[in-house]
Amino acid sequence: MESPRLSIRARLLMVALLATLLPALLALLRFQDDRRAQVAADGQRLAALAQAQAEDLRQRILATTQLQFGLARASVLVQPDRTACSAFLSEVREAHPQYTGILTINPDGRLFCDSLRSGRELDLNDRGYFQRARSSSEAVVLEPAFGRLTGRAVLQVAYPVRTPDASLRFVLLASLDLARAMRPAVQPTAGRRLLLLDDNGQVLAVSPADGTGLQGGMQLAGTPLGQFAAASREAGTTEVVMPDGQRHVWARADVRALAPAGLRVLAGAPEATIVAAADQRFRRDAAWYAAFAAALFLTVWWMAERAIRRPIARMTGMAGRLASGDLQARVDGPLPRGELGTLATALNQAAAALQAQRTDIGALHARLSQSQRLEAVGQLTGGVAHDFNNLLTVVLGHADLLAGDRLDAAQRRQALHMLIGAAERGAVLTRQLLAYARQQPLAPSAVDVNQLVMAIHPMLQRTLGEHIEIAVDGAPQLWPAMVDATQLESALLNLCLNARDAMPSGGRLTLHTSRLTLQPGDADLPAGDYVRLRVSDTGSGIAADDLQRVFEPFFTTKEKGKGTGLGLAMVYGFVRQSGGQIGISSEPGHGTTVQLDLPRASSPVAAATALPPAAVRGGHETLLVVEDDELVRLLASAELQALGYRVVEAANGVDALRLIEQGQAFDLLFTDVIMPGGLSGRELADAARRLRPGLPVLFTSGYTEDAFAQPGRPDAGLPLLPKPYRRAELARAVRAALERPPG
């Protein structure tokens, strides 16, 4: 099939687009070159900064050695007067604030005097610098460390003072403040940092101390930055992602001269700061490019408007009339020349053929749409119709029995109870469907799963049939589960019914409970304690391809009309909403196992207390009943009148509002929520309360309460009586609404 050709306007716009790509590409290439150049240039500046700092440290160490050389010849240091010695060293330290302390150590490792005049008795034999100074022939011993008292990073410069016979007289120790030493005379450019490490990768000093996530005492060994620092004592540069998530450029100084001190000096800066100028130029170029492209596109658009759109306006108008159903539409003459004229002629020819085809196409579309809708709804209605047909069979059968005269009083009461039970089962099924559609909120509480399984066991025996053997294996001392008991019972019943359908010729159903403790990473659940409920059958199993889809809504492996495909989807949603997880395993011919992992409850199971039902009371008030369904309205009115109330009826919200505006007296507004006529129950209640503040209102609806969790739902403080309801439920709801304090 020949591909469609581009229109003239599209071709012009394509040319304009290609024309704008070249400057965009050039701007992008320039931006990349600028960024690389900025990174390289700033890397050199960082290297110079680091090298200058390394040289400054070397000079400070040299100056310290020279100072110690001079101090070693002071007579006060060799005299036994500790006080005079400490006073002398204190004066020296005040004159040289770059040292946190200066002290002398006797050959036996005992502290003799110090600049802090502490008078402490310290044994320094365990200090590495002292051991090296005492036994080494080095002129000076260097060791970076953190002060045990001050916690500050210092470079211990130990100068062994010896007698003429080379025996140790004392060790003169000066603690060089590394944080102070790392403060350059000229502050680095904003964003740049100086970093001082020891050979073990420990951070000694950072200047300035903010902005990188680095701090003194931090261990960088094994990190990318620490590996870069330890790789060599020669100069180098690299890029590293810092703990704050930013990419930094780091330069390493040549510290071979500092090797005896075990120091390494780095300088770094955020890459974003380095390339800021390049980014600014790119933004400027991008703005220029956008303006150029906009001007070019506007020019092309204007030319296309005059040269193309106006000549084809009549054709588009004719096509629009065709699309709206006017099959008599044609392009009037004179027709344009060139390819536009050819197009106009073709349109006129096509219009005639379209007039004949439209009827057939419409009919075909209608049949196709109907088929798709029926197929989509069929999966759901099949299973629902099956359940409702069973209920209707019960209703019709007992209705026939009641219509006859062959039943005694006891049998009639039994038939009535069966009718009521079937109606209640239909209401439960309706609520389950609505709950699935709206994800009804759960009411979790501490539940004894073993007790729940044993409570449902007799019902399962009756429901599944004698051909199914049921085995219960409950774990002793099972934890309580935090779950909605009613929904868990429904989910368990659903799984057991699925198992029954998989064993038409009989088999074994096993319900097993156990305790489960998950560690972090064990499953797609938070670590903690869980209660596991496993349902296993010996049925036909599920094919591997279908096993991956069993939790999808409307997917079912059963025959048409045998299920809705909502069962496992509802169980899945309930378990996940409860904070647990569900899993399934199956092998064709060997059965299926479904396991539910439910969170453990932090509180024990509450003792069940049977509360006596509230007494059914009527009254003598006047009620305004608003219901669009005539049968429901007549039934509600009859029930209320039987309870002693006076009833005023309205078929819709408009009629009810008219009665209110006319001054109709009543004590309670009992209204349906969703009604035709342009006025919903919520809107009616709002209007009635504006006219009569404090008016009691009782809503009723065939939807679940959660179905109104959306704009237009009844106020959360106003009661809702869900349909279907019994007389006792109606009586209690009306009395509660009437006796509720106004507000």
Image: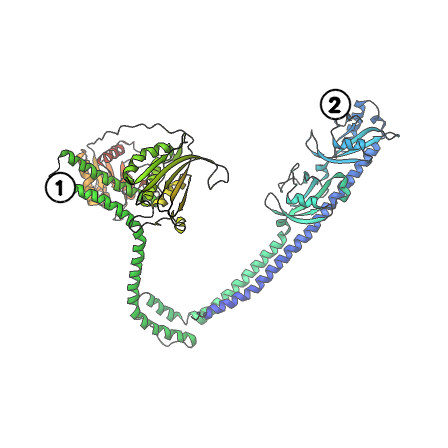
Q: Is 102 on the left-hand or right-hand side of 343?
A: right
User: Of the residues shown, which amino acid type is indicated by label 2?
Assistant: Glu
Residue 275 point in image, percent of width and height: 63, 52
Residue 586 point in image, percent of width and height: 40, 45
Q: Quadrant of the N terminus?
A: bottom left
Q: Nearer the viewer, residue 327 or 385?
A: 385
Q: Nearer the viewer, residue 257 or 457?
A: 457
Label 2 residue SS: loop
Residue tagged 2:
121
Q: Which mark is residue 278?
A: none
Residue tagged 1:
403
Q: Residue at x 32, y 53 (%)?
A: 376
Q: Quadrant of the C terminus?
A: top left
User: Of the residues shown, which amino acid type is indicated by label 1?
Assistant: Ala
- Mark 1: few, some, or many residues within 10 Å (few <14, many ≥20)? few
Which numbered disc, 2 or 1, marks the residue that appears first in the sequence?
2
**For the residues carrying marks 2 and 1, which lies nearer the camera in this image?**
1
In the displayed structure, 716 sits above or below 30; it is above
Query: Residue placed farthest to the left in the image?
Result: 405
- Mark 2: few, some, or many residues within 10 Å (few <14, many ≥20)? few
Q: Residue at x 64, y 43 (%)?
A: 223
Residue 711 appears in the picture as rendered = no
Residue 407 appears in the picture as rendered = yes
Residue 307 image-quadrant placement: bottom left
